[in-house]
Amino acid sequence: MCGWGSAQDAKVTDCYFAPQCARPAKLRTDRYGVKGQLMALCFECSDRLHAERAEQWCRAHDLNTVSEKRAYCQSLSRSFGKPFVDEASPEREPGEDREEAA
């Protein structure tokens, strides 16, 4: 796992959100707002923290519904030169790329 070595595995580290969180930390990630500092998190707190940050970013950019978020992602995917694959679009068959290249 990111940021942990074999010596660290034997040592139990509290989650950054202790004492509210009693689970041991398993991940290290950058501490938001403090450059160069890391914080140790358990899986659940890491998921919660990143989900909260993503929701804050979406609200700041006026992306409130799932359809607005998908439309934003589609606009980003166009900028990378690859079309956004919709769930309803058919999957490509193996070998189709070779046929188009010929």
Image: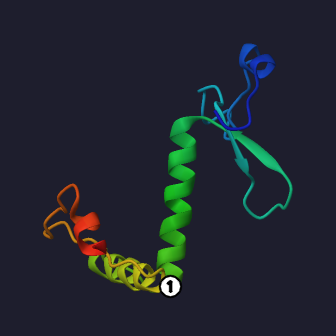
State the residue at coordinates (71%, 28%).
14
What percent of the width, then of the height, locates residue 11?
77, 17
Quarter of the N terminus within the rendering: top right
Q: Is residue 79 left or right of residue 102?
A: right
What percent of the width, then of the height, locates residue 52?
52, 60
Q: Is residue 59 left or right of residue 1?
A: left
> Around disc 1, counting alpha carbons within 10 Å, would you say few (fewer than 14), some (14 to 19), or many (20 or more)?
few
Above or below, 101 against 72 in this view is: above
Above or below, 38 against 57 in this view is: above
| Quadrant assignment, res 46 | top right
3, 68: nearer the viewer: 3
Query: Disc 1 designates what residue?
Result: 61
What percent of the width, then of the height, locates residue 83?
33, 79
State the residue at coordinates (21%, 64%).
96
Quarter of the C terminus within the rendering: bottom left
Going by the numbered disc 1, the residue's amino acid type is: His
What percent of the width, then of the height, locates residue 36?
86, 56
Above or below, 85 against 74 in this view is: above
| Quadrant assignment, res 9 | top right
